[in-house]
Image: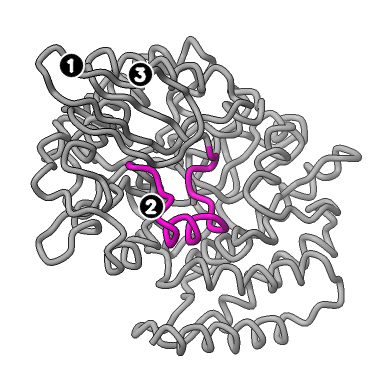
Amino acid sequence: MQRSTGLLLVSALALSTAACGSGSEPATPSAGGAKAVSITVACQPAKSAPKERQAWDDDVAAFMKANPGVTVKSTDQQPCFDPKTFGPKLAGGQMETAFVVPVTNYNDVISKGQALDITSHTGAIKNWNDLRSDHKELVTRDGKVYGVPNVHYSVGLVYNRALFTKAGLNPDAPPTTWAEVREAAKKIAGLGAGYVGYGEYSGGNTGGWHFTQAIYGRGGDILTPDNKKAAFNSPEGKAVLQTLHDMRWVDNSMGTKLLVGWESLMVAMGSGKVGMMLGAPDVVTDVVNKFKGNVADYGITGFPEAKASLSGGEAFMINPKATPEEAKAALAWIDFRFNTVGKGRFDFARGKTLGNPVGVPDNAVYGDSPTGQAIQADRVKNASLPVTNYETYVQAAGTIPPKAEPLHAQELYAILDVAMSGVLSRKDASIDELLADAETKANSVLAAKG
């Protein structure tokens, strides 16, 4: 639920979309006589991450220098996708020229005509042919392309290696079963006041998101195969909530504070006092870059007892109001910042000097293509942490079947937040009642969606 993208080309007309961020001088016509063009782009790092923000601004300046006549204005919303603001911004026509869309929202955005058909512009992404075909298919409808795949991930178990050592656990042998997760969590919580063995979300759509991760891992599902009915009121769904209930109230290994929303758990993880959480490799990157975690402390391993792993991602899409010149400039930015080996987000040498956790296996949209291999080689060359910390995750990710987020994910996640919050806030909460109530509400939403 959250992440980045890439660039090339340029020219013509100013766009009047409002945006905040790196204020640049108004664009002027290029020497070749082309008209000035102004674009707005999503995902500028927040002010709380000054080094990353400066790197972004440096890239903006470099891009504009290489593309005379183009002005880039940045929106610094983090994470790039916020389910609370995405819908209203989209409906109100307030999206940036280049904006981020999670895979769960591809169908809605494309079907409602809220993304530009960029089929004739994909050549602006120099490595377009190296992007994984299965991810390109996700942004393609009836032979027309509506986005540039930017992120792909599968979920594992993120853990604090330093806390494992402190608690007498072997950081090179992380848990592979939920029973082992519970035992490790109890030992970490036993380190003293303020230590949390296992962290979990309970709101802001992230509670339902993590419920989905957990039920997929146990072999369950959120929806029936035809996507018409809820399927989570099942033995697997009950096992997810029962495990969390027991960890919270029997083991006392989850702390007493409800973590609502993405940032709350990330802050806790960055504090160095949370032992484990579900997440993709980018969790480590965000915890270090945005929440002051120690880069050497974290590792990620495969999902415990996984029968499947939630697989998600995002793409950059272009505002349908963009002129052809604005669309070309926006795709050029996407190519430059997010899809060029050794540049922008793939400038691992720069990332290392900034103290970023270079070496985390985050991003598989290029797979094993020549571009993907070049990115990985550069990542390993500039690694700032032991790549072995992530080897068990890499091995697991190659063997555990990926499973996409459910249709109408955000609405369902909001409903499932209530069940997650219920077992984590009330010792006497009835799991059967929580799931039955969520099932009724989910089926009502699904019926309305048709």
> In the picture, residue 97 is in which quadrant?
top left
Q: Secondary structure at mark 3?
A: loop
Residue 101 has which mark? 2
For marks 1 and 2, the one nearer the N-term is 1
Can you tell which of label 3 and label 2 is closer to the viewer?
2
On the rendered structure, is 218 left or right of 365? right
Instruction: Check disc 1 and report the residue beneath it.
Output: 30
| Residue shown at 28% from the left, 33% from the top | 14
Q: CA distance from mark 1 to mark 3?
A: 28 Å
Question: Which is nearer the N-term, disc 3 or disc 2?
Answer: 2
Residue 292 among magenta residues: no
Read off the magenta span. Answer: 77-97
Judged left or right of residue 247, residue 75 is left
Residue in the picture at 65% in, 35% down: 160
Query: Please, what secondary structure does the residue beneath circle 2 have?
Result: strand
**Residue nearest the viewer, comparing 403 with 400:** 403
**Which residue is identified by label 3?**
347
Observer-nearest of 62 and 210? 62
Quadrant where the C terminus is found in the figure = bottom left
Give the residue displayed 62% in from the left and 49% down from the top: 262
